[in-house]
Amino acid sequence: MSQLLQAAAYGVVQGGLLGLVAVGFSLVWGVMNVINLSHGALAVTGAYLAWLLNLHFGLDPFLALPVVAIALFLFGYALQRGLINLVINAPIFLTLLLTFGLGLVILNSLQLLFNADDRTIETSYASQSLALGTVNVPYGRLAACGLALAITVGLAAVMTRTRLGHSISATGMDRGAARLMGIRARHVYAITFGISAALAGVAGTMIATVGSFNPTTTPGQLTLDAFVISVLGGLGNMYGALVGGLVLGIAESVGGLVLTGTWVNAIAMAVLILTLIVRPSGLIGKAQYSGRVEV
Amino acid sequence: MALSAAACGGGGNTNTSGSTITFAAPVSQTGAFGQAEGLYTLQGYKFCQNTLNAKGGINFGGQSHQVTLVTQDDQSVAATSAQIVDGYNDKGYKFILSPYGSAGTTAVAPVVERNGQVMLDSNGADTAIFTHGYKNTFAVLSPSSTYVTTIIDALAALNPAPKTVAVIAANDGFSQHAAEQGVKEAQAKGMTVVPSPTAYTSSTKVAANATDVSPALIAIKGLNPDVIIVSAHLNEAVAAVKQASELGIKPKLGFAATVAPPTPAFISALGKSSEGVLGSTQWVPEITASDSIFGNARAFLTNFTTTFGWSPDQYPYQAADAAAACEALALAIEKAGSTDASAVRNALVSLKADTFYGHIEFDATGMNTNKPMYVIQIQSSAFVTIYPSNLASKQATWPAVK
């Protein structure tokens, strides 16, 4: 029983971390209908930035978060305005190709700059844990989970209570109508992509703090995780990524304990398939996002 | 070299230049092994090629032949390795240096056999490769059966020796076989394996290259083993050490792992958490072995690490495996006096060579079974040889867990 509780507790905090990885990816997919295959590369870029700040200035990764987020926001904004916007009306395959290629360019640049070694940000607390009886809750992942929750709530507030959020939502629902209302879609898209890149950078910083990262295998895994979680949680709801991440994290952790760890990927895919059979729009996604008008 | 001229102490080489000889290798430069093990293997091959050519190449028939190394990224996919080697055969490349890892080597071996190529296996240790009756695959490294058993032997020699061990194993053939033999050795040494002797096939089995091994760790939580042994590769070993700390799992004495600890990537991925971890290794620079190409083991270390910018305290042993495989192939070609693959294969069968890597001699299955393995411990971010005791450069820090 204690093993089951431990697995569940670990699954929750791991799920929060996964949700953090996916929230920016889900935002861009939901608003711009762009499946950003460079999301993992942006996350790893954030991880390297936080790692450098820690290495050279001793900056704690949590204190580095604002710097990473701002830098990645500016980078994401520029990418969208200067590059992705050029193909925003093109068939989805072209945006897939573009973002895939973009990811490769970023990763090869990182590999040239830092080589391919695994890196980690060492802190005194990330690998320690809070003992609750026989259950240990790792501080690092707990903090990442809390961050995911705070960011999701904050993002939901921005989307529902601010002019910027309404502009983003409106553009995501019907770009043509949004333009008629005076919304500058190009600028809104760039801000959305910038926010997504900033969130990717935050997630990358957390990955670097609780685990390790490298420019060859980490980005692909993060992008795949983000894709699965976005589909599982559903688009069009700011809480979709968090819910998807939590469900996936718990399923993998508890399922891995019951069926052994080699079943983890199969369990994740089984949960995804079952969810899509019952709810094609994802756990809490909005069906309207599959039938929106693009002008 | 050439090889024989240098071996006899001759300094000059009066041979004329002959045709170049191609060594071909499918080596991982991307994918799961791309950032570490594949890179080290590739560097070992390159270092061998450069050193061989600097020494005059391979000498036979009154001519010295330079070596050309052809490589292609197999993306850490075994099937791709096999396809690449098939393509090499179409181009007439008969001399193959193995990809990194047992999976890739297992896939390539039947291709080599079918095509009449000859493969020197540098980093595929799974003994299953050598149970198919292949005639053209020869491994310079110790087999998978010795990876965990050597760790157990080293642990048994430490004070205090562990009474209980837990074995986490990846679900690839190499890791499972290493774990199986290690569990037997542990039981033979009077150690208790928790949660059960067969747990490495079920509750403590993890997916190969997994970065999350928490289910296996949770399965041993509360059992408080003296030592946790990870029979796997880099990703799993890094995850095990990190996540054990997160989950409050602390072995009483320490961690040990195959493959990963004696690699620079293990230290860069774990930082201070890598301190004290034991690891079995194929080669250490303390061995008293030498040859006319690389010099002695210490000289190999110095020259290799200088060439590729590694710290001599953090040398990748996989590069020594790779260089030794390349050297064995060169020696066999010179012995055969020909580049005919069949003649070179026959020369390998009867090859007996003392090298910087130790003695190389293949048994009937193609394995270099007499070569011992060694155990290092990470101390102050350096690989310190601790087993066997006659090669130990320092005493083990034990218990490693404070």
Image (cartoon, coloured by chain):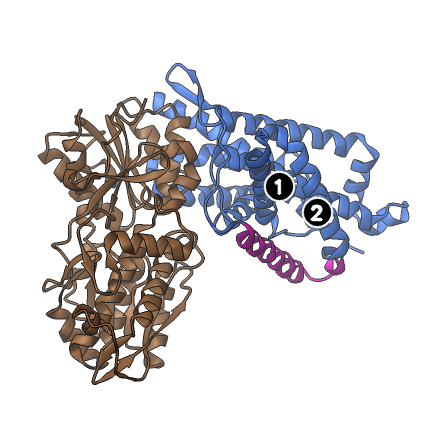
Chain colours: A blue, B brown
Which residue matches tag 2?
A76
Subunit that carries the residue with mark 2: A
Give the structural element (helix, strand or loop) at label 1.
helix
Q: Residue furthest top?
A: A133
Quarter of the image holding residue B185? Answer: top left
Mark 1 and mark 2 lie on one chain; the one further toward the N terminus is: 2
For the residue pair A272 and A72, the one nearer the viewer reads as A72
Q: Position of residue A59 (x, y in %)?
A: 59, 30
Q: Residue furthest front?
A: B11
Considering the whole magenta stretch, tell me its main secondary structure.
helix
Q: Position of residue B80 (x, y in %)?
A: 38, 65
Label 2 CA crowd tier, 10 Å (few <14, some 14–19, many 20+): many
The stretch drawn in magenta includes residue B267: no
Q: Is residue A38 visible?
A: yes
The stretch drawn in magenta includes residue A98: yes
Q: Which residues are magenta?
A: A85-113
Q: Position of residue B95 (x, y in %)?
A: 28, 74
Quadrant housing the C terminus of chain B: top left
Label 1 CA crowd tier, 10 Å (few <14, some 14–19, many 20+): many
Mark 1 vs mark 2, CA separation in Å: 10 Å
The amino acid type, in three-letter code, at marker 2 is: Gly
Q: Position of residue B318 (x, y in %)?
A: 31, 54
For the residue pair B181 and A244, the one nearer the viewer reads as B181
Which residue matches tag 1?
A200
* For residue A248, side relative to residue B70 (left or right): right
Give the structural element (helix, strand or loop) at label 2.
helix
Quarter of the image holding residue A8? Answer: top left
> Decide: marks 1, 2 in contact (CB < 8 A)?
yes
* For residue B260, side relative to residue A93 (left or right): left
Quadrant housing the N terminus of chain B: bottom left
